[in-house]
Image (cartoon, grey):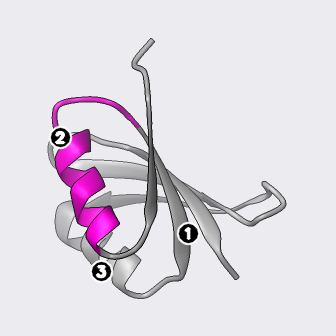
Amino acid sequence: MAMTVSIDLAKTAFELAAAEETGRIVERRRLSRRQLEQYFANRSVSKVVMEACGTAHDWGRWFARRGIQVLLLPPH
């Protein structure tokens, strides 16, 4: 099952919510940087949605190298 994951980026902790294709949220987590990388290594994620901020572009490239579609939202 392909999931969409929404991430709230921060300096040391990341909040995420994972949704099924139907839009139903199936998981919410608070992860460290290392845990975030492990999370994506062990799941089938098709899209990541993040607010465009200083580190979002770096993370976006990290996800794109893994074949995950990235959507950056304007920060308003």
Residue under numbered circle 2:
55
Say which of marks 3 and 2 sits in front: 2
Which is more toward the observer, 63 or 19?
63
Of the 4 image quadrants, the one containing the C terminus is top left
Say which of marks 1 and 2 sits in front: 1
For the residues labelled 1 and 2, the Cα–Cα distance comes to: 20 Å
Image position of 7 (left or right of 65): right
Q: Position of residue 47 (x, y in %)?
A: 53, 60
Please say whether residue 10 is one of the residues in the magenta stretch.
no
Sequence-wise, which precedes: disc 3 or disc 1? 3
Residue 18 occupies quadrant: bottom right
Residue under numbered circle 3:
38
- Amino acid identity at mark 2: Thr
Q: Residue at x 74, y 66 (%)?
A: 20
Sequence-wise, which precedes: disc 3 or disc 2? 3
Residue under numbered circle 1:
46
Q: Position of residue 33 (x, y in %)?
A: 20, 62
